[in-house]
Each structure stands twice: as C-alpha cells, then as structure tokens.
Amino acid sequence: MATFLLRRLTFLVFVLFGVTVVTFAISHIVPGDPARLLAGPRASASQLREIRSELGLDQPLTTQYLRYMKQLAHGDLGNSLVTGRPILTELADRLPATLELMFCALICSLAVGIPLGVLAATRKKSWVDHLVRAGSAASVSVPAFWLAPLLILLFYSRLGWLPGSGRLDVDPPAAFTGFLLVDTLLAGDGRAFLDAVSHLALPVLTLALLDAGAVARLVRGQMIDVLGEDYIRTARASGLPPRMVIVRHALRNALIPLVTVLGLSIAQMLYGSVIIESLFAWPGTGNYVVTAIFNLDFPVVMGFALLASIAYVGVNLIVDLLYMTLDPRIREAG
Amino acid sequence: MTLRLNASLVAALLILGSIVFVALFAGVVAPYSPNAIDAAHILEPPSWHHPAGTDEVGRDLFSRILFGARPSLLVAFSIVALASTGGVIVGCASGLAGGLIDTIVMRLVELVMALPGLVIALALAAALGPSLVNLAIVLGLLGIPFYARVARAETLSLRERAYVRGARTMGAGTLFVMRRHIVPNLLPTVIIFMSLGLSGALLGASALSFIGLGAQPPLAEWGALVNASRTYMLDQWWYAAFPGAAVAVTSFGFTLLGDGLRDALDPKNVKA
Amino acid sequence: MSAALLQIEDLRVRVGQSRRQFEAVRGITLRVETGEIAGLIGESGSGKSLTAAAVLGLLPQGAGLTGRILFEGADLHASLRSGTVRLGRDIGFVPQEPMSALNPTLRVGHQLTMPLRYHERLSRRDAMARACAMLERMQVADARRVLAAYPFELSGGLRQRALLANAFLMKPKLIIADEPTTALDVTVQSEVLTLLKNNARELNTAVLFITHNMGVVWHLCDTVNVMQAGVIVEHGRSRDVLSNPQNAYTQTLRASLPEQAGYRQRIGAA
C-alpha cells in the first residue's frame, strides 16, 4: 500500500513537471507578442522594452523556465495578460460553477446509465437490451455542439420552459461555497434555488445524455461478465431471488472495476464541459479558457492546463485508492 | 479468422457506405455547387429545391453538407491513421523491449494522457493559426497513447506464445518479429479500437472546427458549418441541425462498426 | 412402488443458439429415493452436468427442455415457481470448482448466511451460529476464522467444505453434487467424500452425485446411472453394476480403474 502510494505520488510529480515543460514550450511557439498585448497597440518601443524585461522575456529560455517554476512553487500562476489579475484567483473564482455543473451531470448520468446497463445485461438479447445498446451507441456518437443547440431550441425557444444560458437571473445569494444550489439553500432563498436549478437543467441534461451512454455500455459489459461467473450460480442455487443475486452479488463485483473508469469519465467531462460552457454561456473555467485562447492570453492557458493535469492525476489516484479499498483481493495483496 | 455478420455491422456498413460514397462522388450527387451564392434565396427553410435550406449567402446547405463529407472524413481518418500507426509502433516496441525502456516509454505515454489534450489542441491551434491540417496532426499525436497501451498489452501476452519465443530463439530480429508475428495478431483488437477511434476523432475534430480553430470558410467541413450557424441558430434551426446531424450519423456509423466488429471477432461472443 | 423423491422421465435438453441447437440430453429416466446416494457417471460431454442444471432450473440462456422432472411427486419447476419447493431449503447444490464458486469480494460467513437469513428470516447472529455449527460438522477446525475470511484466504479444501456446509445448511431433502471433488487434491478428495457421505446418512439427505470416476461411485453411491452421449445406458445398485456390468460402455469405464488399488479384485472383476 505504501509503495503504491509512493509510486503514484512520484508519477504525479513527473506529470506536473512534464506538463509545465509542454505548456511552457507551447506558449513560446506562439507568434503573438505578450508584451505588445499587455501594452496595447500604441506603446512606444522603449515601453515595450521595459515590459519585456519586466516579464523576463529578454532572458534565455531556460532562465525564463526556471523563473516560471519558482513562481509555481509559490503557488503563483502568473497574471492574466488581459485583465492583469492573478490567474489562480481568476480560475478559483470560476471553478465552483464548473464543478457544480460536472457534479450534477455525473450524478445524473450514473443514475441513468447504471440501471440501464444492469437492465440490458440481465435481459441480454431481448428488445430492452437492443434498445439500450442502440441508445448508448447513439449517446457516445452525438456531438455536444449539436445536442445543446437542439435542446436550447426545444426547451427555450419553442417551449419557453427553461432558460438557455447563464447561471442565474435573479440576484445571487451570499457566496459561501460558490455552489449556487448550496448557497441559495443556506440563504433560505427558495426562488433563487429554483432559478439556479432551472439554469442548471439544460447544460446538465446535455452533459448527462452524452455521458450516460458510455456508462451504460461499460456497466452492461461488466455485468455480463460477472453474471457468467460460478459464484452467481452458487447464489442462485441457494434459492436467492434474482433481485438479490443481482444487487448483492453481481452489481457489487461489476461496479468495482468501473470505479477506475469513473476517473476517466470525470476527465471526459472536464474537457466536454469546455464546449458546453461556451454553448450555454456558463461562467466557469472552461468558458474562461476558451476566451483566453482567443485573446492569446497564454499564461491563463498554461495555468489551466497545469490545474487540469493535477486534477486528472489526482482524481485517478483517488479512484485507484477507492478501488483498492473496495476489492479485498487487491487490498490484501497491495 | 471468420467474420459473422450481425445487426450492428450491417447497419454500420450501410450508413458508412453511403457517406463514403457521398464523399467520393459529391460532385455528381449534389444538386448545386457548394459555393454557389444566390442572393435571392438567403436563409430559406428546407424545401423541395433546398432539402436542407440555405445559408446566409444563399448557398444550398444540402450540397455544402455533401461536399463537407470529404474533409470531415479525411480529418477523422488521418487522425486515426496517425494515432494508430504511431501507437502500435511505440506499444509494440516497448512491449518487446521490456525492462527499463518499457517502463520509461510507458511513463511518457501516461504523461501524454494526463495532459489536457483539448486545451493543448486549442492553444496550438490558436498559436499556429487555425487549420485542418494542424488539427489533424495535433489530435493524431495526442491519440497515440491509447493505441500504444492496447498494442503493448497485446504484445506482452503475445510475446510469450511459443511461436514468438521460437522465432526469437532462432535469432529473429525485433523488427522482424514485430512485423511477422505480433502485429498481424493484434490487428483485430486494434481495428476495433480504430473504428471507435474514428467516431471520437470525428467528434473531436468537428468540435474544434466548431470553436473556430479547425476548418476555415468556405470549406464546408461539418463542424465549421455549425460554427457559421451560431448567429442564426435560434431562428434558422436548419442551419445548425443538418450539419450537426451529419456528424452524429457518421459518428454513430463508426461506433456501430466498432461494436459490430467486436461482437463478430471476439471469441467470447462467438455464437456456439 | 412408492414415489421416488426425485423422478426424471424422458428428459431431453437442447442447447446452442437458435440456428445450431443440438440435443445434449436425449431422453433419460432416473430415480433417486429418499436418503439414497445415487451416482450419475459419464465422461465429459455426456450431458450429466446439463442434467443437474436442468433439475435445478439453471440451464444456460437459450436452452430448452422437455420431459418430466418430479420432486416428491409434483412437477419440480412448477413447485419452484410457486414457492412450495425452494432451492437451498429443499434442494441443495455442491459445485465443482471451489476456486470460483464463492464470491471473492464477500466474506464466507456473509455468503453462507445470506440464503439462510432469506429463507428462514433469522437474525445475523442466529444465522452465523447455524453456519458455524455446520462448518464444525464439516470438520473445519477454526470455524469462526473461516466465516470471517474471504475465499481467497482459504485453501481449496476449506472452500469446498464451506460449499458443502452451504449445501447442507438448511437440511435439504436432496443435494445435487456436480463433481465436487474433481478439482481437489487426491488426499482432500477422500476427506470431502467421507464428509458428504456421513452427513447425508446422518441427515437422511438424498444425493445425486455426478462424477466421471468409478472409484468414487464404488465408495460413495448406493445406486448408479451410467450416462453416455445423452442417454442412460445402464443403471442399478452400484455394487451390482460394478461387479457385473452388462453394457459395453460400463465395462470400459470399469476397466479404467487402476489395478494397483486393488479395485478390480475387490469388485470381483477378472
């Protein structure tokens, strides 16, 4: 267990190092001139020189890189070239919006995908199975930029049931957690809560629809494998009713390996949310990064890439630990 | 290796067959030229003359979608070709080499997987200028780890087979063993991954074009078409709906192909 | 003649997918009386395991059966459906592979007590006590430890004893044992067989014992049915059949017994 943790932590460090190198390299291929960006189009040559030396742009690359690493060690991701504010703050401000969206979407997609996968596996080759397989194949094939506009068109334009963009129309409550669902309830503001929910509805629906198919496919595959195992036969031969066999024996064993896939699923959502946020004008990190990219605000992009990598490796680490605690065979051995 | 047809496979071949046909013969099938501007028929809803409606300069959307099949498909194929070739070579070589080389290579592979690919692709595209070619290269390179892992796993199990060990004992070089023994046997698995990969590649490439960092106008690549429709999305629904549907259907075809192949080739699923 | 505990009449089982089905069990008839240990012997592919699966109602998907299976005079599958007869409580099962027949992620005690608590509505403590007692009957030295352990922590022999305990736990009238010792070491085999025989006798449990080993039949079974390619070619009291096999196939089976163990002399063969 300890060696495993040690190995994974070293890997985390290795990845972070690698990411900084990559993002640093990319931002220096950029033809755009950050100094000019910061100074504006009418800056004089001497002003540009001043800014360049301030940013350290006149130093050799390795020096710049080391300087960057030193900054990182202090938790400083640099400042946005556009707003001048610290990037870490900007990202942290917008993170709750993205997390709230992802979290709700994850819950919804699991709540739909897992039961459908189980249903399809236990009724293999029936019409239910074929329907679920076709539906989930469609779900993984549909592009977000097609589904989202269609849903917006239907529920916002034509039916007028749900809002098509943004996070909140009424005044926001006092920000404790940054999660509107939590903060509105804490403030006792029922109207704001409902408003937040209605704004979450379409983006969450889009993300969940896109992910549920993948979940269903995986659960179905795992369940089919598990249901063919000997111990399922022993359980059945002991007279346990089908529901008990599925839930108490099969599901447990089928879902354990899926925990590792959860990590991948979250990573998928992180990247998918970039597009979704831009489509729904959702004030999260994804939207922020896309804007930054078009503004050639590369420090922001590098900062986001770094954080996203940490998140990815961190989530995978947690997920692996979870797997180890759930599967007694691994627990004893590792 | 026998191939048994199943429902998924048949459906996939029908769908993909038509789309590939359209891509190849768009010039013959399309009723209009994709760039034919017609100021008198701007933003018209679907009708007999224009089954998918027209865009903001009067071009027939249906024809544009048909002509857009070729770049959309080409990008997806290039991405997968690059990723799978690179991935198989890396994974195979790493698996056969074993030891320290294997460890180092796989750590690097995992590193690439940990990178937020989408962000990097976006950043590079913004930095180097948006183009379909750049997109294909970046996404292709980012896709190598997935194939490398699969190839390596298969290689590790294959290399213990008797015929491989025999060949190596007799002095066969690594490259030769790879070519003659390993690669042909891991092809079925890799091909399944490639089909599913085509679906993902198409989705990824069109998503990037949708953001504006891939195909540029007047190229009628499907993602770019949906991007162009953004201003008109709410009222002229057909503009976004049909190109998007084209992506969805084609991607669905690739997914069905992967599923169908898996069902047909996987020995566990062979019908007794 | 009184009704047998288990009566199978003209059982036919078809397996395979829709297009390519074939009949693996082709019309067999056999009886098991109350308290009797009946053997069903045949080589792999003879259809004996499918027979067992058919009785339990656990055939693979897509398989079909015709014929009658009567338990205590009534149609077994109908009784199972209506709940008058219940697997686990009235009919037990001992599987072949102790390695894979237990859920690797659940403790043994948990797995054993789950059906017991379901059928008899016992509390966890009472069920554990029953399971403990049954394990001790199976001569498991440290029953508590075994109950608290995960399957992978136990040896094959211990696992099979746990599975035996599982089968006998609710004192069923009939136990179907599908080659329960085939996957075990030879020394452990005889221990397990002895346990099975003694407990069956003490509890007056009938056993349908499926095997491919004549020696086991000799030691364990009161009656034997010889199965070849889906049909029963010979049956009767095991001593009679083994000393004086009428059917050619049975003769081949008997001829395969090792000479050194002195079997042939003991059963009066040439």
Image (cartoon, coloured by chain):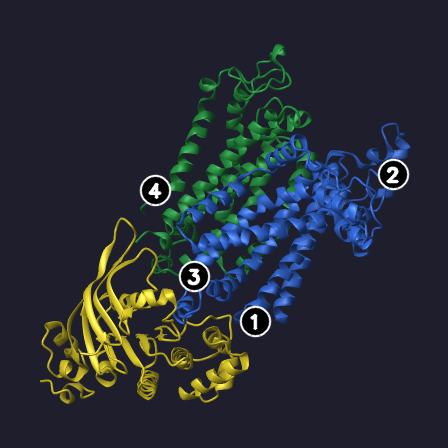
Q: CA distance from mark 4 to mark 2?
A: 67 Å
Amino acid found under the numbered disc labelled 2:
Ile
Image quadrant where one finds the C terminus of chain A = bottom right
Q: Are marks 3 and 4 in contact (CB under 8 Å)?
A: no
Q: Position of residue A155 (x, y in %)?
A: 65, 35
Number of residues whose C-alpha sits closer than 10 Å to that of mark 2, classed few (under 14), some (14–19) or many (20 or more): some
* Letter of the chain shown yellow in the rendering: C
Quarter of the figure with residue A296: top right
Q: Chain of mark 2?
A: A
The residue depicted at 43 percent of the width and 41 percent of the height is B257
Amino acid found under the numbered disc labelled 3:
Leu
Q: Judge by depth and name the residue closer to the eye, C219 or B86.
A: C219
Q: In the rendered picture, chain A carries what hue?
A: blue
Q: Position of residue B252 (x, y in %)?
A: 49, 38
Tell us which disc is closer to us: 3 or 1: 3
The residue depicted at 46 percent of the width and 54 percent of the height is A221
Residues flagged by tags 3 and 1 on a common chain = yes
* Letter of the chain shown green in the rendering: B
The residue depicted at 58 percent of the width and 32 percent of the height is B133
Label disc, if present, on residue B5 of the rendered structure: 4
The residue identified by callout 2 is: A51
If you read the primary sequence from the N terminus, does the residue marked by circle 3 or circle 1 appear first?
Answer: 3
Number of residues whose C-alpha sits closer than 10 Å to that of mark 3, classed few (under 14), some (14–19) or many (20 or more): many
Number of residues whose C-alpha sits closer than 10 Å to that of mark 4, classed few (under 14), some (14–19) or many (20 or more): few
Q: CA distance from mark 3 to mark 2?
A: 66 Å
